[in-house]
Image (spheres, rainbow, N blue to C red):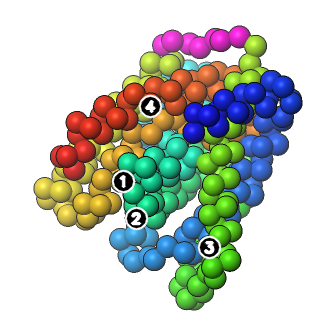
Amino acid sequence: MYIFIAMGFVAGRTKKVNSESLATLLIYFIVPVVVLLGVTSTPLNLSRILLPFFVALFCAFIGLTFRILNKKSLTTSRLGIWSYAVGSGNSGYFGIPLTFFLLGPDFVGITLLIALGFMIYENTFGFYFVARAHHTAGESLIKVISLPSIWAFILAIILQKAEVNLSATWEDVYKSFRGSYTVLGMMMLGLGVSQLKTFKVDIKLLLKVFNYKFLIWPVLMFAFLWLNKTYFHFFDGVTSKVLFLISLVPLPANSVAYATALKTEPEETSWIVLLSTFWALFFIPLVWGYFSYFI
């Protein structure tokens, strides 16, 4: 994944690849196909259907908390992009391969459902947070409704309820799109950085964002999962482990896509997201190694 970031950087510097076109390709074409084929091919029961919505609400709670507590200290543009970003995480580009390597291929299906929760949040509350920096509430809601991944998710549930099964050919298509989703998403980080002329990051903002993403996010998730294990028993042990692992992922690479598409602090967003991705290289093994046994 870090090699993909470096490749994106080289492509941006030497071949002048356009990150805005790649962002549009990911948001409006690749992500909807991943959602449609991924949900259609994953067995669903009531608890699994509810899992994405639980994750989306968890994300929204953190994003709204950040927005309320920082409304007076941040500009409108910054407040929008970071309210979205701290509530989300790189569950797809980073989280899916992370789960594959740390837990095994049998856990990837659950990770995809969790990633769908992040997508639901990103395409509803998250996109609304970002779009509000430049649009009215009505215009922002129209942009949310126009995002195809929402409709892809609904169509996938309809197809599964109609017992439409994917052939082997479509399974191969899904794997190809899932791979391109990871590769292009991580390369987009490198592309974003390649277009920057100088390194300029507000340290106070960086620490505030890291505090939410790498402290508040996993602490709240760990507390919920401990209560679930002790009292609620709503999620099984397998699902709980994946939920905790995904709570540790860095800031979402889609932050760069949204910031670029809507011209909302794209340079600062690129640097902070990149720094969070490198910090995750040390943070995830440390926290996972010490705390995963308690889930």
Q: Amino acid at mark 3?
A: Glu
How packed mark 1 is, by other alpha carbons closer than 10 Å (few <14, some 14-19, many 20 or more), is some
Q: Are marks 2 and 4 in contact (CB under 8 Å)?
A: no
Specify the quadrant of the image occupied by residue 270: top right
Judging by the rendered image, the residue that carries numbered circle 4 is: 280
Specify the quadrant of the image occupied by residue 1: top right
Callout 3 secondary element:
helix
Q: Earlier in the sequence, mark 4 or mark 1?
A: 1
User: Distance between the Cα atoms at labels 1 and 2?
Assistant: 8 Å
User: Distance between the Cα atoms at labels 4 and 3?
Assistant: 31 Å
Judging by the rendered image, the residue that carries numbered circle 1 is: 103
User: Distance between the Cα atoms at labels 2 and 4?
Assistant: 23 Å
Q: Residue at x 44, y 76 (%)?
A: 44
Callout 1 secondary element:
loop
Q: Residue at x 43, y 49 (%)?
A: 101
Q: Are marks 3 and 1 in contact (CB under 8 Å)?
A: no
Judging by the rendered image, the residue that carries numbered circle 2 is: 106
The image shows residue 206, relative to residue 159, as above or below, that is above
Q: Earlier in the sequence, mark 2 or mark 4?
A: 2
Q: Main secondary structure of the magenta part?
A: loop
In the image, which disc is placed on residue 171? 3
Callout 2 secondary element:
helix
Would residue 28 be counted in the magenta stretch? no
Q: Residue at x 54, y 50 (%)?
A: 92
User: Distance between the Cα atoms at labels 4 and 1?
Assistant: 17 Å
Q: Residue at x 77, y 50 (%)?
A: 25
How packed mark 4 is, by other alpha carbons closer than 10 Å (few <14, some 14-19, many 20 or more), is some
The residue range painted magenta reads 198-204
